[in-house]
Each structure stands twice: as structure tokens, then as C-alpha cells.
Image (cartoon, grey):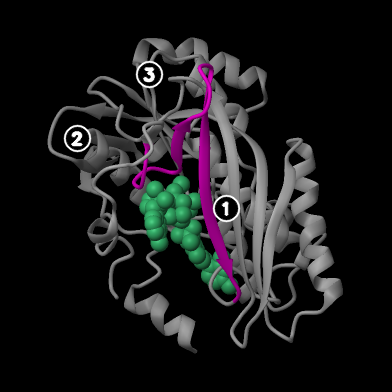
Amino acid sequence: MEDEFAWLDRVSPRRFFQPNVTEGIGDDAAIYQTSPKFEDILCVDTLVEGIHFARETMLPTDIGYKALAVNISDVAAMGGSPLYYIVSAAVPATWTEDDLIMIYRGMRELGDSYEMDLLGGDTVSTDGPLVLSVTVVGRTEKGKYLTRRDAEAGDVLVITGPLGGSAAGLHLLWNQGELDFEDEANRTLLQYHQRPDPQVIAGRMFAHETSRAAVNDISDGLASEAWEIAEASEVSLHIDQDVLPLAAKWHPQFSDEQALQHALFGGEDFQLLAALPADEWPALEKQLQTEGIPALKIGTVQAGDPAVTLHAEGEQVPLLKKGYNHFSAENQRKGSE
Ligand SMILES: Nc1ncnc2c1ncn2[C@@H]1O[C@H](COP(=O)(O)OP(=O)(O)OP(=O)(O)O)[C@@H](O)[C@H]1O
Ligand SMILES: Cc1ncc(C[n+]2csc(CCOP(=O)(O)O)c2C)c(N)n1
Ligand SMILES: [Mg+2]
Ligand SMILES: [Mg+2]
Ligand SMILES: [Mg+2]
């Protein structure tokens, strides 16, 4: 298999039996209406040992925290609040009962902060790696959910915070023999990788404080997620390289070019990327700042065939639709080592 999604189209149902489904396969999460006031949000993401984490890169508490965080991030990208979660764990003999308790402690730490309830799950043994699959249910007010389809020419393109921190943190973990965990600059990058902060408040603001917004969370890298908005909305996105908030910009270990590559293609940052009407941005920016969210305008939306262009020093370069692909030759090799 070379592509994560080519086959999906062939198995996607062409119609729904249930009349209350409003969004099926295709966005960050599914949406179905459950009451006159609300729509429910449903999503699942999986973390696999050796692919998403390793014993060397994450404590059991971090693994649990991140397994839930990546799902809350998809709820945030739909403009909702997370409510419930269930967990499927495939556990090899190399992981102890204490490890599992710590994984659940990490999940609970984050879940409690959102007043989410753990409602169930499933546990099986495996002779493969540890696999954790978390399903989250969230909710948003009727008609208020956000898709990737609503970007229009003239919009501003906004990001909720620094990019590339997760990839830089992972790079430190793998490549820095004696990593100084007391160093503040290192700790910041490790935190981005090990305990990403899903942008629920920002997602709620995009849903409620704009007349329209197209939103995606950054799991596979800015380039890849920008392309998803460009394709779903049939617009051309223009990103200004000089204003991109690079998480590793001031870290002595990374060159500016490395920090940029991590931001564009690294992934797992879990910031929200949003396109919204330009005249609504100044007021929203102030509201986001009041909440302590360092959101920034990083570009614009223009009419044209789906494309993403990076502007730097008077030059424009097309940004490749490159991001983390589970089935690329590179990642296949890594997985089988
Ligand atoms: N195996 C699958 N079966 C059915 N639908 C799937 C499957 N894998 C993905 N999807 C659907 O495809 C869409 C895109 O999934 P994808 O996992 O890329 O979204 P995401 O969670 O935003 O990204 P990431 O997994 O990188 O965090 C979603 O609507 C998802 O429900
Ligand atoms: C040990 C280890 N090696 C590599 C990575 C990097 N990584 C794994 S999956 C992924 C993209 C998001 O996945 P998904 O599309 O499933 O959300 C990235 C950037 C990691 N986190 N840990
Ligand atoms: Mg997503
Ligand atoms: Mg997913
Ligand atoms: Mg996801």
C-alpha cells in the first residue's frame, strides 16, 4: 500500500441509512445531529509503538496523554468540546500492569482537565507492538461545526501557535546522546512532542466568533494540512514564510532551515490552521490573545486551482503536498526495522 487514502474512497458508503448523519468520512471527525440544539462529533486515532512512540521517547504517562490529546485535537478542529472517550488497548507481554496504569493516568490527567468521562474500551493481548486506539465523542451547537471546505478567496490564513516543535523534540530525543532535561529550551520542544496541547478554546472561537471558517488540525505537517483545505475548498493558499512561528527558531541545536522543514513537513504539532474572512480577523485576534493563544496570520486565500504556495524574499515556490505518510517507502522501512 502506498497511499493512506486512495483505497478509502472505494470503501466509503455512498449514502447513509441514518438521516441524522451530517458528515461521514473525509474531515477531522464525523458529525451527526442528536438533538434540536446539538450535533455530536465522533473520531478515532491510534498510536502504535515504534511508529508514534517508543519506550525511549515517551513515558507511559506521556503515551496516554498524547493518545487522548490527538483525538481531542480532531474534535477541536471541528469546533467542538470533547465529552467522552473509550480506549482499545492491544498489549504485548513486554508492557506491565504498572505501565498500563501509568498510560491511563496520563489519559486521565488530560481528560479530567476537560471534564471528559472514560466510558469503556477493550483489552487484548498481541505479539506485536503496543497499540492504543482512542475514540472520542464531542459536541457542538447545531450548525456550528467547522469543516475544511469553507475557505474563500480573500480570507486570511491563521495558525494558533508554534510549528515544528514536535518534530524538533523528537529529533533531540533520538539524536542528543546526553540530553539536558533541565534546559528550558529542550523542555519546551520535548513538551510539544510528548504532551501536545489540543486547541479546543481556539476551535470554539473559530466556530462562534466568525461567520465562517475552514479549519484543520496539524497532524501531518503544515504543508499537508494546508493542501487538504486548498483541495476541499477549491482555493489557492499563500503562506508567508517569514511570519511562520517556528518552534525551534531560537534553539541552538537547529538551523533556521531545519526549523522551517520541521514546521512545514514534521507534523504532530496539533495547532489549528484556519481560513476566515479577513475583516473578522482583527477582533478575533484580540479575543484569542485574551485567552493567551498566540494565534498569527500566516497567509491569505486566493481564487484558483487548489494549490499551496510559499512566499519568501520576493520569490514564490509551490509547497509540495508532502507530510507524514504511513505507507511511504521511508516510513515502511522504519516500521520493519
Ligand atoms: N480505516 C478507515 N476507515 C474509515 N474511515 C477512515 C479510515 N481511516 C481514516 N478514515 C477517515 O478519513 C478521514 C481522514 O482521516 P485522517 O486519519 O487523515 O484524519 P485526521 O485524524 O484528521 O488525521 P491524522 O490521523 O493524521 O491525525 C477521516 O474522516 C477518517 O474518519
Ligand atoms: C518513535 C517515533 N517515530 C516517529 C514519529 C513521528 N511520527 C509518527 S506518526 C506521525 C504523523 C502523525 O501520525 P498520524 O497520521 O497517525 O496522526 C509522525 C510525525 C514519532 N512520533 N515517534
Ligand atoms: Mg485531524
Ligand atoms: Mg486520523
Ligand atoms: Mg487526527
Classify residue 280 by image quadrant: top left
Dot 1 or dot 2: first in sequence order is 1
Q: Please identify, in this view, whether the residue under mark 3 or under mark 1 is nearer the observer.
A: 3
Dot 3 or dot 1: first in sequence order is 1
Give SS at disc 1: helix
* Residue at the image point whose x is 56% and y is 43% from the top: 73
Is residue 266 shown above or below 299?
Answer: below
Whole-angstrom CA distance, mark 1 to mark 2, is 29 Å
Label 1 sits on what residue type? Gly
* Residue at the image point whose x is 81% and y is 79% from the top: 96
Instruction: Answer whether labels 1 and 2 touch (C-beta < 8 Å).
Output: no
Residue 301 within the magenta-colored segment of the rendering: no
- The one nearer the camera, 95 or 323, is 95
Label 2 sits on what residue type? Glu
Pointer 1 residue? 165
Pointer 2 residue? 234
Pinpoint residue 62: horizontal percent, then vertical percent: 73, 60
Tell me the magenta residue range: 23-49
- The one nearer the camera, 43 or 186, is 43
Whole-angstrom CA distance, mark 3 to mark 1, is 29 Å
Pointer 3 residue? 212
Query: For mark 3, does the 10 Å Cα neighbourhood hold few (<14), some (14 to 19), or many (20 or more) residues?
Result: many
